[in-house]
Image (cartoon, rainbow, N blue to C red):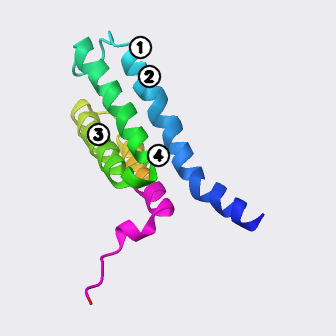
Amino acid sequence: MNNLLRIVLMWLPSVAITLFYIPNALDKILNSNQTDKIVANPSIMIATGVFLLVATGLFLYNKTILIGTSLLALYMTFIVFVHMYKGKPYEVTVLIIMATIFASYIRKPQLFHPKEEV
């Protein structure tokens, strides 16, 4: 029971992050004709949605968690700059970046520690 609780608590932040990125990606793919975006080209919106789905998949797979985390954090950093440019609040997007990195750290903390040379 203790091991099961540990696994559930370890994956909980990742599930929460996934529940943010997947609907965002699907909205970009299925509703690509959004006019209030900086880039109004439907092809770019669909490509962004596919990028988010791939990055989320990489984030969820343990062997590629670092690549997925990097891609998701890079995407959200770009969104922070877009929100700053448009004068929108950007604090929540910064928190999403931090939560993505935190979820990755909770699942694989050894990726964030430097390797010791012998």
Circles 4 and 2: CB distance less than 8 Å? Answer: no
- Amino acid at dot 2: Leu
Of label 2 and label 3, which has the lower sequence position?
A: 2
Residue that label 4 marks = 60
Numbered tag placed on residue 75 in the rendering = 3
- Amino acid at dot 3: Tyr
Q: Name the spot of residue 27 as percent of width and height, x first.
A: 43, 20
Secondary structure under tag 3 reads: helix
Label 1 and label 4: CA atoms lie apart by 22 Å
Label 3 and label 1: CA atoms lie apart by 19 Å
The boundaries of the magenta stretch are 101-117
Residue that label 2 marks = 26
Q: Name the spot of residue 48 as percent of width and height, x first.
A: 29, 26
Residue that label 1 marks = 30
What secondary structure predominates along the stretch shown in magenta?
Answer: helix
Circles 1 and 4: CB distance less than 8 Å? Answer: no
- The quarter of the picture where residue 50 lies is top left
For the residue carrying disc 2, how many other residues have a C-alpha within 10 Å: few (<14), some (14-19), or many (20+)? some
